[in-house]
Image: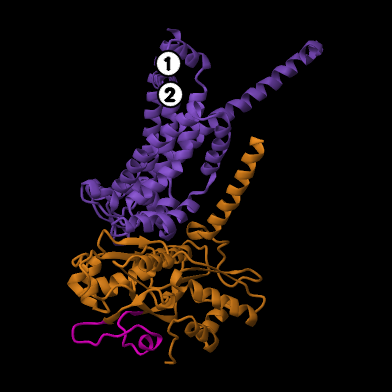
Chain colours: A purple, B orange
């Protein structure tokens, strides 16, 4: 409307104005990339000495005791892996089923109660859940027969609970985004509700579901304060077997949080902690890259399905 | 509607995050780094969690002696305090162990000689759950237990149950002291370390609460932090020595084997308000507070 009435001589001005706005948008757009690159460079600068000064065999040794200069990262990698796998096994099926219930089966009034409640769960700070795990969950695990309540499994349960809101909320959004015509068409062809959900809606929402799961895993890997309180922080390599999860472990994030305060800047221990940060960064990067690939593949399939 | 709900939730989140971040200031830098006594500026005092209650009590009592000097006390562990002193962010570092040679070198590299001030003695109590039938252990047995050579309570006269080891984090001076004096039995050539399955707790409360609820657990803590919900063990220096219960008296007369000095470190000889404060701590008023809090006061020498 304004443009139609604007006098012709303001046209160059408008061009300049537009250029500036475009420039600002460009900067905003690439700023995230720049920040990520800067974080990576910073981690690399502070952490690279760990990889140069310590022989790799020692760095991936099975004992972590930094005050004696023993920097074996294996127990920390095992700890993070155990806790993460446990949490994923618990949270992913539970989260997806909850999302399907919310998105496909629950009556409208119930959904309106449940959805905001789940979103509030996502806002509970992890340290608060950590306290809860410490006070309530750990004694339960101990009474169930473990030597101590502070185990990898306790951490897994807590992290599963923390990642559930993310998984449910985003999965439900993905299911919601599936056009109603898909469901109508399927039902009109005589498919049951279950067949419609399983064969039509879930495949159509697949890329969103994958993102939900990956974001959930991301939260699990990066979570710190909760696991610091409930996993026992023993830099321990549990013997392989079904009882593995019921041993105390020390995760990479908890190690950084617990030890960062003690180190003198520039010391080897300081570099190693940044090195751990670097490894965490790479793990997150790989998880995201995998997610992008999976989404890409399933996205293409959805399109084909849509055209048919 | 949903916007209000969300902003409400995020305000709540923000408040809780602020609370949490102020509560766990272990990684936080505290204030400016000027050397020497500040005029009207708070003396920054940071370090050992063993000393933190003592340091708070001193800071509070000193306000009545010198109302215009304020002292900011934070915990985080001896290593944390010493690192902060080296990095120049605190005036006084509290430590429940002596500074390591490597730390002194780092301080010199940053341009100052750290000065040590002995401020109190702490007896370290070995604690178990009150349900545990074991009453006494020798240093040798403790070393075998904490290195993982003994893993079942029946080997030291208890029930047939696994032993759960509980320790402070490695940034704790208590951890280092226990490592040197008990796990390594005071032998500097001994390179034994804690068993890998040792639970490392971020605080003294972490240790006591695990001991309180776990009949298989054994841990250690400063005498001033032990409550009636944990059982203290009698400890003998070696096979021929008597078993002694930790107490202020047995810590002071040297009969209890696991007692250690508590220290404050300053960057160079203290001057002005900081020197006055440390002198007051070592004096009768400061040492009375030491005794009141369950630590062992310095004896006149």
**Residue denoted by label 1:** A302
**Residue in front for this viewpoint, B98 or A257:** A257
Say which label, 1 or 2, has the lower sequence index: 2
Magenta residues (range): B236-259
Query: Mark 2 packing: few (<14 Cα in 10 Å), some, or many (20+)?
Result: many
State the predominant SS element of the stretch in magenta.
loop
Quarter containing the C terminus of chain A? top left
Which picture quadrant has residue A163? top left
In terms of secondary structure, where does tag 2 sit? helix
Quarter containing the N terminus of chain A? top right
Q: Position of residue B268 (x, y in %)?
A: 48, 73
Whether callout 1 and callout 2 share a subunit is answered yes
Whether residue B263 is visible, yes or no, is yes
Q: Which mark is residue B295?
A: none
Q: Which mark is residue A207?
A: 2
Q: Is residue A254 above or below residue B194?
A: above
Q: Is residue B253 magenta?
A: yes
Q: Is residue A210 magenta?
A: no
Q: Position of residue A289 (x, y in %)?
A: 39, 29
Which picture quadrant has residue A236? bottom left
Q: Are marks 1 and 2 in contact (CB under 8 Å)?
A: yes
Q: Position of residue A162 (x, y in %)?
A: 45, 44
Tell how many labels. 2
Q: Using residue B189 as the reference point, say whether residue A67 is left or right of it.
A: right
In terms of secondary structure, where does tag 1 sit? helix
**Residue in front for this viewpoint, B138 or A7:** B138
Q: Is residue A264 above or below residue B238?
A: above
């Amino acid at each position: 409307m304004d443009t139609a009435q604007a006098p012709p001589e303001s046209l160059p001005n408008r061009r300049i104005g537009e250029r500036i706005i475009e420039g600002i948008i460009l900067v905003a757009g690439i700023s995230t990339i720049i920040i990520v690159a800067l974080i990576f460079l910073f981690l690399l600068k502070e952490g690279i000495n760990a990889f140069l000064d310590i022989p790799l065999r020692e760095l991936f040794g099975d004992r972590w005791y930094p005050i004696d200069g023993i920097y074996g990262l294996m127990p920390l990698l095992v700890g993070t892996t155990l806790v993460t796998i446990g949490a994923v096994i618990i949270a992913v099926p539970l989260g997806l089923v909850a999302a399907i219930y919310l998105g496909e089966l629950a009556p409208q009034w119930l959904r309106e109660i449940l959805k905001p409640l789940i979103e509030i769960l996502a806002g509970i700070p992890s340290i608060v859940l950590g306290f809860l795990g410490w006070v309530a969950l750990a004694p339960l695990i101990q009474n169930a027969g473990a030597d101590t309540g502070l185990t990898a499994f306790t951490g897994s349960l807590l992290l599963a609970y923390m990642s559930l809101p993310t998984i449910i909320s985003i999965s439900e959004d993905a299911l919601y985004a599936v056009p109603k015509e898909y469901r109508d068409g399927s039902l009109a062809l005589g498919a049951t509700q279950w067949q419609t959900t399983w064969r039509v809606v879930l495949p159509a929402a697949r890329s969103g579901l994958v993102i939900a799961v990956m974001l959930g895993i991301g939260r699990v890997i990066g979570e710190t304060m909760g696991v610091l309180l409930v996993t026992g922080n023993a830099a321990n390599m549990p013997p392989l077997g079904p009882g593995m999860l019921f041993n105390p472990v020390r995760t990479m994030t908890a190690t950084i949080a617990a030890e960062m305060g003690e180190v003198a800047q520039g010391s080897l221990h300081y570099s190693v902690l940044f090195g751990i940060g670097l490894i965490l960064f790479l793990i997150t990067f790989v998880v995201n890259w995998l997610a992008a690939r999976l989404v890409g593949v399933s996205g293409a399939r959805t399109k084909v399905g849509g055209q048919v | 509607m949903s916007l209000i709900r969300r902003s409400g939730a995020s305000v709540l989140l923000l408040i809780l995050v602020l609370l949490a971040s102020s509560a766990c200031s272990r990684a936080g830098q505290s204030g400016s780094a000027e050397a020497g006594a500040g005029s009207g500026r708070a003396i920054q005092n940071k370090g050992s969690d063993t000393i933190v209650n003592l340091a708070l009590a001193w800071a509070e009592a000193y306000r009545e002696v010198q109302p215009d000097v304020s002292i900011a006390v934070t915990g985080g562990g001896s290593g944390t305090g010493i690192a902060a002193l080296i990095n120049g962010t605190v005036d006084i570092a509290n430590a429940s162990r002596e500074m390591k040679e490597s730390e002194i070198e780092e301080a010199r590299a940053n341009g100052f000689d750290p000065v040590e001030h002995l401020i109190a003695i702490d007896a370290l109590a070995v604690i178990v759950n009150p349900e545990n039938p074991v009453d006494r252990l020798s240093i040798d047995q403790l070393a075998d237990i904490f290195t993982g050579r003994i893993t079942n309570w029946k080997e030291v006269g208890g029930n047939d149950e696994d032993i759960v080891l509980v320790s402070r984090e490695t940034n704790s001076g208590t951890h280092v002291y226990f490592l040197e004096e008990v796990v390594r039995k005071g032998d500097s050539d001994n390179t034994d370390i804690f068993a890998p399955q040792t639970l490392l707790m971020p605080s003294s409360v972490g240790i006591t609460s695990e001991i309180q609820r776990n009949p298989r657990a054994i841990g250690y803590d400063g005498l001033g932090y032990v409550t009636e919900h944990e059982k203290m063990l009698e400890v003998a220096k070696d096979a021929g020595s008597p078993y002694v219960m930790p107490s202020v008296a047995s810590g002071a007369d040297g009969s209890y084997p696991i007692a250690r000095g508590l220290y404050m470190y300053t960057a160079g000889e203290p001057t002005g308000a900081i020197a006055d404060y440390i002198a007051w701590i070592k004096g009768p008023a400061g040492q009375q507070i030491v005794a009141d809090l369950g630590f062992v006061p310095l004896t006149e020498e």
